[in-house]
Image (tube, grey):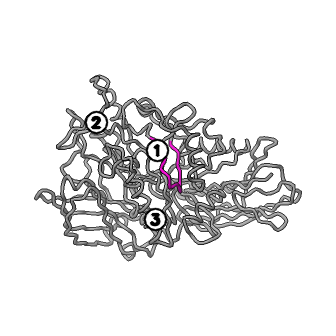
Amino acid sequence: MMPAFFRYTFFTDTQFINLFDGLDNPALNTVLLLGMLLMLVAGYAEIHYKLPGIPSILYKKEPELVFDLPFRGEFGKDIPLFLFIKDAHLYSVTLLQLEVYVLYDDKVAENLHYSIQKQSNARFQALSWYLPASAFRRVGNCQVTALLHYEVAGKKYSLQQDNYNGISHEPFRIYIAAAPLPQLPGLYWGDLHVHSNYTNDQIEFAASIRETAMCGKAVGMHFLAITDHSYDMDDYPEDYTRNDPALEKWQTFWQEVDQLNGESDDFVVVGGEEVSAGNNRKENVHCLVMGNRTFYPGTGDGGERPLRNKPSLQLPELYQQVAEKDPQAIIAAAHPFDVPPAAQRLLLNRGYWHSQDLFNEQLDYWQILNGRLDNFFQNGYSTWRKALLQRLKIGVLGGTDAHGNFNNFRQLTMPFYKMIKHHEQLLGQARTGIFLDEELSESALMSQLHRKRVIISTGPAAVITGVSESKVYHIGDVAPARDALTLKMAVKSSDEFGTFSAVTLYQGNYETGREDGIKLDEAKGQLAWEGEKQFPRGTSAGYFRLEVKTENEGRTAICLTNPIWVE
């Protein structure tokens, strides 16, 4: 999401890296550095870099030590707890003991103790424990506190949740669900925009792929797409200040993805990248490419060379290269309606997707759901409906853009000075559902993504199926307009997300340029509903799709199906 910003301008304890490529104007450098301080960073915070002459209240002579766990789990199942250790090669740490407290209504219900007695001096390391299901005694909200005792340079310390300065360390909040995520026949849930520890720079890092997959499975999902930034994937594995022409990092990434998929038959990791490419105004935008074995370099907004921020790859060039080298890959506009902050627009030449970029048949999807039902989502939803009425067969995807961030979103708002913490854009909070006709596999997921047999959701599930002259038409298919058509609909929620507040069948009409909604009020107030709508004389050319909303304690969740087209 955010760049490795001006990655050549930082101190460590022993070295000052100053590779401004000849930009030796002090005033200009000051402007660039102040611009960097305005950036928002999406992942776990890197705290070991300092600017010359500028103190850091976040800096510690300790490795970053960050606990995390899923924001939801299921009753009767163990819950994974993760510890991510960063920069122990600079500050060796001995992990002594872990205490875990499970609380209900702020009262301790379970106390777990783990002896670790392990030293770490690695650049990055992940440890995990499965907290027993017996510790989570009932359905609903509970809290978890992780208390670590450790030693650095002969001194003993303790931390709760993480060792960051400047943010609160209250217990994790986790919801223990009575049931899995809402299910329909053949439906598999996943998050199609996720970052891993292959995103690694002076400002942020993320969780390792294996642990991210473990967390995704605990949340109730079946797959993830790991899409790290193109400007991170071409660096040397142990030196993000230099590009690696051999692309060792990219090769290692795919080896790890293949290994994980070979070890599991109930969870799939889809590999890919978030490519920085130029829009029609020659601004940098982000494009998800999934299932590509070829690396597509995009460095325009990576901050590797200050002010040299023109796109290194234009969107039409990317589309052509993917079509030639990876025809099986999926291409999606990443969070296309999110407007970057002014500092990013000025210093990184970062823009957003315009109509000329989005209304393109070479795009498979728009990722309009990026973790939150905010104004950017609403803008994307509205524009998608306009595109459908203009006969563009574009699909929509959902994801979170999570850089780690399983239970808390720990964010630098001003590097070296200020962090905040919130509970949005957590792994799996926004999801893509894919309907499969066969067992779960990477190839099955990619095949159905190409067919657009896809829904997006923050809670409930929905499906629409057409039947015409004994032939069945699924989401993403094209049914004949002239024949009688029966639409069969099924929607599913759970106590976690609440009953249906609205279920609407939308019919788009190409001739009138309108989309009319048919409210299915018989579904309101229920957790599950099935029904049908008949069109005995056929329909006008256009499409049908479902929109479902639920309410629970003031929280709204939504599910959108991609269309069945009618022509």
> What amino acid type is highlighted by mark number 2?
Thr
Picture layout, residue 241 above or below residue 180: above
Q: Position of residue 130 (x, y in %)?
A: 35, 71
- Rendering coords of residue 104 (x, y %): 37, 67
CA gap between label 3 and label 2 equals 36 Å
Under circle 2, the secondary element is: loop
Based on the picture, tell me whether residue 294 belongs to the magenta stretch.
yes
Is 260 situated left or right of 549 in this image? left
Residue of label 3: 258
For residue 545, side relative to residue 118 (left or right): right
| 456 relative to 504 in the view: left or right | left
Q: Which mark is nearer the camera, 1 or 2?
A: 1
* Quarter of the rendering occupied by the N terminus: top left
Which range is magenta? 286-298
What element does badge 1 sit on? loop
Q: Amino acid at mark 3?
A: Asp
The residue positioned 41% from the left and 62% from the top of the image is: 256
Of the two numbered discs 1 and 2 on the same chain, state the one appearing first in sequence.
2
Q: Please, is residue 406 above or below residue 335 in the view?
A: below
Residue position for label 2:
9
Q: Which amino acid lies under the numbered mark 1 shown in the image of this protein?
A: Pro
